[in-house]
Amino acid sequence: MQITRFGHSAVLVDVAGKRILIDPGAFSDGDVFELEGLDAIVVTHQHVDHVDPDRIGSLQSRNPDAECLTDPETAALMNGFRPHTAGDITEIGLVTITGVGTMHAEILPTLPRIANTGVMIHATDEPTFFHPGDSYTHAPDRVDVLAAPLSAPWAKVSETVDFVRRIAPRTVFPIHDAGIAPVAYGIYWGHVSNNSGVDDARQVGPREAATLT
C-alpha cells in the first residue's frame, strides 16, 4: 500500500492495483485535481475543505470510470456520486472500501450537524487504512495506518491524542492541518507523536505531498 498526501485531508491510496482518492477539497494542493487513472473518488462530507465544488467536476471528467462515493446528504447535492454510509461495502477489484460513521463532529451546539462517513480501505495481505473525515467518534478495530485530523474547529489536542490511542494503529500521520501556521505545527504534532503511544508517527507537514508505505 502506498499513501500520498496532497495537503489538508486529500489522500491518494494505491493498493492492489487500484487508486483511490479521498477528500479532494479546496485546501488541497492543486495537483490533486490533475490526477488521472483513479478507480474511486471518496468524499467524507460536504464541507469545501473536503470537496471543492468548483473543481470536483473536472476531476470526475478526467476519471470517467471512477466509482464516486460520499455520504447520503452530499450525494444528493453532487452529480455522479452515490450514497455511501456506515457499514456500506464497495468492492473495487481486490480492494474493499467500508463506510464508517454517519455524523460530523459537533462544532457548536447552535450549528446543525451534517453527515460524515469515514472510510476503511483494505485488500488481502495489505495494511488496513482508516480516514475518518471529520469525526473522532468511531475507533474501528485492526487499523494499521491512520490518517489523524490534527486541528479543526471541532477538536482539541487532548481529543486528538485520545482518538489515536483508542485506535492504536501501527502508523499514524496527520491530515486536516491546513489551518495550522508552520511556526506552530510542531506543537500540535508533538503532542500527538509524543503521547499517542504509536512508535511510527510520521510528520507530513501542511500542504505537502508525501508518500508512505
Image (tube, helix red, strand yellow):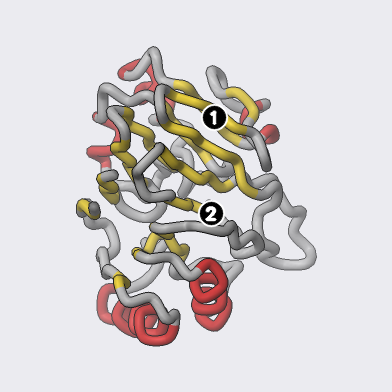
Residue 127, compared with residue 37, is above or below; it is below
Question: In terms of secondary structure, where does tag 2 sit?
Answer: loop
Q: Give residue 167's position: percent from left, percent from top.
A: 53, 67
Residue under numbered circle 2:
132
The answer to which of 208 and 19 lies nearer the viewer is 19
Residue 174 coordinates in the image, percent (x, y): 37, 64
Report the front residue among 172 and 180.
Answer: 172
Within 10 Å of disc 2 (Cα), the crowding (few <14, some 14-19, many 20+) is many
Quadrant where the image shows the N terminus? top left
> What's the distance in space between the residues labelled 2 and 1, CA to CA?
14 Å
Disc nearer the start of the sequence (2/1): 1
Inspect the image, locate mark 2, and give the three-letter code of the amino acid beneath it: Pro
Q: Is 110 placed left or right of 89 in the picture?
A: right
- Determine crowd level at label 1: few under 14, some 14-19, many 20+ residues with C-alpha closer than 10 A: many
In this view, the residue in front, 11 or 163, is 163
| Residue at left offset 41%, top offset 52% | 9
Residue 136 has which mark? none
State the image coordinates of residue 73 (x, y, percent, origin top left): 69, 35
Amino acid type, callout 1: Leu
- Please count the marks in the image: 2
Q: Looking at the image, do the residues carrying marks 2 and 1 touch, with CB atoms under 8 Å apart? A: no
x%, y% of residue 183? 26, 80
- Find residue 155 and report its image quarter: bottom right
Vertical position of residue 207 compared to residue 124: above or below: below
List the single residue furthest toward the front: 125
- Answer with the quarter of the image where residue 69 lies: top right
| Residue highlighted by disc 1 | 69
Give the vertical position of 152 relative to 7 (above or below).
below
- The residue that appears at 59% across and 57% down in the rendered structure is 140
The relative height of residue 29 versus residue 166 in the rendered view (above or below) is: above
Q: Residue at x 70, y 51 (%)?
A: 103
Q: SS at mark 1?
A: strand
